Amino acid sequence: MAYNLKNEEEVNEYLKNLHIEYQFGCYSEKNPEVCHLLGNFYEAIKLDTDKAASLYKTTCDQYNYARSCAKFGDFKVIGKGCEKDIPTAYKYLSKSCELNDEYGCLHAGVLGTSKSDIGEKDRATQIHTGVKYLKKACDVYNLDKACFYLSAGLKRLPCDSLINDTTDITMRFYFFLISRTWLAAAVFVTLVSHGILSNAQSTDSEPNKNIINVDVYYESLCSDSMRWIVNQLVPSYPELKRHIHVTLVPFGKATHHRESETGPWQFLCQHGPSECRGNKAQACAIHAIRSSEATENHQPLMVNLVGCAMLAGTPGTAVPQCAQAVGLSTETRKLIDDCIASPLADNLLAANGDKTEALQSPLRFVPTIVINGVYSKENQDEAIRNFPKLICRHLTAEKPSICSSESAEN
């Protein structure tokens, strides 16, 4: 059934059904991801932070779901939906980091390097552990904020000076959320200018038959999509760019429908209207790059722009800023802005929906990575774990140096 999201009654009906679906998935099917989404629903839609906190805690305790551990830890820092308790907050944040949640690592590192008593046996152990978590957030997950704290704070200031009290901790968490878009854009400018990410102007345009086609079906607000693009695709792209042809398809588990051939498109996205806006913005950016930039620059510009937007965590609003950050021309940036504000955005997203449904209807996992036009569970699982290794395994001729590195062997 298609819902008219401009109609209040239909929106309420949609939210009611979504609530039932999340409850069934969590309580009957015992799916931790759905339990976490139910917590998000209570937090953002029902505005019931007590229930949200309880769900995050239970999902962490029972299923070791890393994102829920991090969310409950964040709640305990500021007393949101629960009693404020810094040692308990640190316990859950550090657990989420050990379970490989990047923001759990960042926030555990913030607490560990503060003056707050987090329950470690002594001050030296606390600082050492906090630095370890910040380093993991920086080195493993490339979180710009963690790298900034390590370079600008820990190397120059006494650790006791980093955060004076829990109020400062709270402010740092909020500053992180507010500034993330601009930080992402700034980080991408720096990385591209230093050659750490692919610079479109230096792309080797010579034909190469040893090419693997990689189709990425993803969603702009899906945490798994963000994690894979930022931690797998973007870091490996500079070494793999001569050996892969990437097609990015933002749509995911959304649905699309219109009443007639000329009627307006209606979309329902898994993470709500903001995700639909993010999907449209990225579809517009991809289309504009293909329409306006030099052919040899298409792929690196698309990968860098989408990587920038996904790193920002606010893909809809981040796209125009990232377009400037990665060096798109004035003409291309105008095309993006015009597209976002026009029916073209709907048509592009609908085309992505058609392509996604032709692959799987509905899509079983987001992101889904398809190699050479054929989906297989083996390729999907390996792509999520170690994308460079998957590409190296499929290459039959010349292989890049990354194929002999530790990252492609593990």
Image: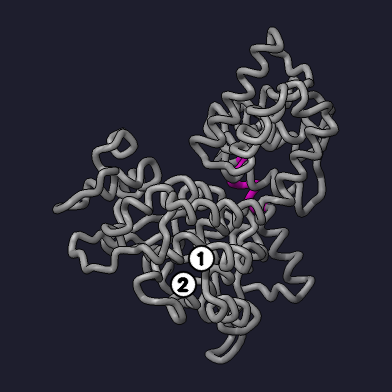
Is the residue 133 above or below the residue 251 in the image?
above
x and y percentages locating residue 269 in the rendered image: 60, 64
Kind of residue at disc 1? Phe
Horizontal side of 41 relative to 213 (left or right) equals: right
Name the mark on residue 251: 1
Q: Are marks 1 and 2 in contact (CB under 8 Å)?
A: yes
Residue 287 image position (x, y, % from top left): 48, 76
* Residue 21 visible (yes or no): yes
Alpha-carbon neighbours of circle 1 within 10 Å: few (<14), some, or many (≥20)? many
Q: In the rendering, at what x and y percent does residue 284 appear?
A: 54, 75
- Residue type at the position of mark 2: Asn
Q: Tell me if residue 252 comes above or below residue 233 in the rendering.
A: below
**Mark 2 = which residue?**
352
How far apart marks 1 and 2 lie (CA) works out to 6 Å
- Give the residue at x 65% y 58%: 314
Query: What x and y, as percent, mark residue 136?
Result: 53, 31
Q: Which residue corresponds to the image point at 21% horizontal and 68% vertical from the top-left?
A: 207
Kindly state the secondary structure of the residue where label 1 is placed: loop
In the figure, residue 160 lies in which quadrant?
A: top right
| Secondary structure type for disc 2 | helix
Tell me the quarter of the image containing the C terminus: top left
